[in-house]
Image (tube, helix red, strand yellow):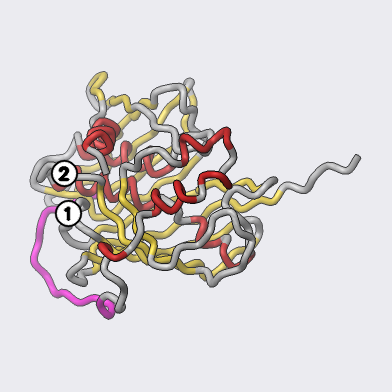
Amino acid sequence: MSADSLDLLLALLDLEPLEVNIYRGQNRDLGTGRVYGGQVFAQALVAARRTVGDNREAHSAHGYFILPGDLNAPIVYFVDRLRDGSSFTTRRVTAIQHGRAIFNLSASFHIAEEGPEHQAPPLPDVPHPDTLTPELQLLRDMADRIPESIRSVVTQERLIDVRPIDPIDPTSSEKHAPSRRAWIRAAGRLPDDPGIHQAALAYASDYGLLVTALQPHGIPYRARGLQLASLDHSLWMHRPFRADEWMLYSTDSPVTSGARGFVRGTIHSQTGELVASVAQEGLIRLRKPELG
C-alpha cells in the first residue's frame, strides 16, 4: 500500500467545517456508480465526534441509507446535539446532497469506565495475514475478467488493506456458505487520535459486507440485473483498538428473504480481543429482463 492511499483515507475523514455543527466531505469512487456507504457512515461519525468532548469516544452508531449518494457532489453533514449527559453523549447526523437527505446516523459516546468484562471465545485458528494475498492483487490478477468500463477503478489503490482467508472469485456463480473471513487494516500508520481509528474502522466495516448474503445463491457481485444496496448499518465498538493494525473481520448471513439480506460480523484484534460488532440489512433485488 502506498503513502498516497493513507493520505486519501485521512483526507476523506478530514471534514471541512462550514458553520457550527455543519461539515462538508468529499467522495471517492469505488466503481459502483454511487458513493460507498462506508464512506458516508464514517464521515457522519467524524461529524458527530467533532461536537463531542475529548474525554469520550463512540461506543455505537446506527445509520439508515435513504438515497444513493452522488459521486460528483460533496456531502454536507448537519449535526443535532441531542444530549450531553454526565457519562453519555448522543448525536444525530443528517447527510445532505442536492437539498435532500441521503443518510442519517445516530451515535452515542461514552466516557471511559471500568466494569466487568467477558467475551465470546477468542479468535479461531486462521492463517497469519502476512501469508495471504491482498485482495487488490487478486483483483489485478483477474483484471481481464473485469468489465473495461470499471477496471481501472476496481483495481485502483485501496484505502484499506484486505487479506481474504478463503478468497472467492467475484465473477463466479459457484455457490458458497454464507460466511467470509478477512484480515483488514488501514493502508498505513494512522495518527494516535482514537476518533480517527474509529472512523477508519467505520469506513472498512461496510466493505463487502452484503456480498456475504449473495454467496449461498451463487449470485456474482456484479451480476446483470442485480441491485445491491445497504439499507441500514450498525457498528458497536467494545474496547479501544488501532485500525492500522491487523483485525480479523468475520461475517455471516443467517437469512435472506423479501429481497433483503441480513449480515452480522465480528472484528477481533490480532491478539484475540473482540473490539467491534457489526450488523446490516441490505437490498438484494434481481431485476427480470423485460419481455419483448
Q: Amino acid at mark 2?
A: Leu
Relative depth, front residue between 150 and 244? 150
Which residue sits at x=27%, y=63%? Answer: 129
Residue 115 is a magenta residue: yes
Which residue is the site of mark 1?
242
Of labels 1 and 2, earlier in sequence is: 2
**1 and 2 marks in contact (CB < 8 Å):** yes
Instruction: Determine the secondary structure under disc 2.
Output: loop
Q: Quadrant of residue 257?
A: bottom right
Marker count (numbered): 2
Residue 42 visible in image: yes
Rendered-image quadrant of the N terminus: top left
The dominant secondary structure in magenta is loop
Q: Which mark is residue 46?
A: none
The answer to whether residue 209 is above or below residue 255 is: above
Which contiguous range is marked in magenta?
108-122
Q: Is residue 78 left or right of residue 16?
A: right
Res 172 quadrant in image: bottom right
Verify whether residue 109 appears in magenta: yes
- Residue located 40% across and 53% down the image: 135
